[in-house]
Image: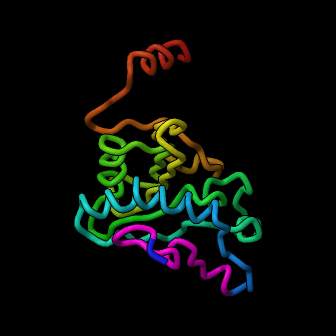
Amino acid sequence: MRLSKNFTLKELIKSDTAVRKGINNNPNEDHIESLERLCTNILQPVRDHFGKVVSVSSGFRSGELCIAIGSSLNSQHADGQAADFEIFGVSNREVADWIVDNLNFDQCILEYHKPEEPNSGWVHCSYKNDEENRREYLRAFRDANGRTVYQKEYSKTTGPSKEDINNSLMEG
């Protein structure tokens, strides 16, 4: 089943873990509609802009798959609203910044990216709908204790808002 010009349901539900463990990772109709919105509003525009294959490493995850990989049942992946992906040969920071500057999205997380390694990490992006999207840009990294930390991030063109600057001054 085609979800958009360049994306299929098969690639958005593919999971080696599900296959290996015999887990049913088939979405219901609501999940498929969410995956179509994700492809139409995020993945396809990214593919069209960069003109290169968008490699999806994780899309829809059933509840059983979420448990098997240690993910939250509340993950947007479990609702068909999120995908983890990258474009080989394009910095993940460049991809994430382009999404933030050009698309309506819910969350865009630059996961475990190291500036000195442009292709490190991956991009996680979610889409709910035009009215509910939070347009939240975050960077995920591990702190000194190995815990994942999420920090607000800014694209090179938008930068922090006055409210963000005021809030950071009040925290210090």
Q: Position of residue 47 (x, y in %)?
A: 30, 64
In the foreground, 43 or 37: 37
Quadrant in the rendering for residue 21 = bottom right
Asked whether residue 95 is drawn in magenta, I would say no
Q: Position of residue 46 (x, y in %)?
A: 32, 58
- For the magenta stretch, what is the residue range? 3-19
Quadrant in the rendering for residue 62 = bottom right
Q: Position of residue 137 (x, y in %)?
A: 45, 40
Asked whether residue 16 is drawn in magenta, I would say yes
159 sits left or right of 49 in the view: right
- Report the colour scheme: rainbow
Q: Residue at x 35, y 62 (%)?
A: 44
In the foreground, 71 or 83: 83
Q: Residue at x 32, y 70 (%)?
A: 88
Quadrant in the rendering for residue 25 = bottom right
Q: Position of residue 126 (x, y in %)?
A: 51, 51
Rendered position, 140 above or below 6? above
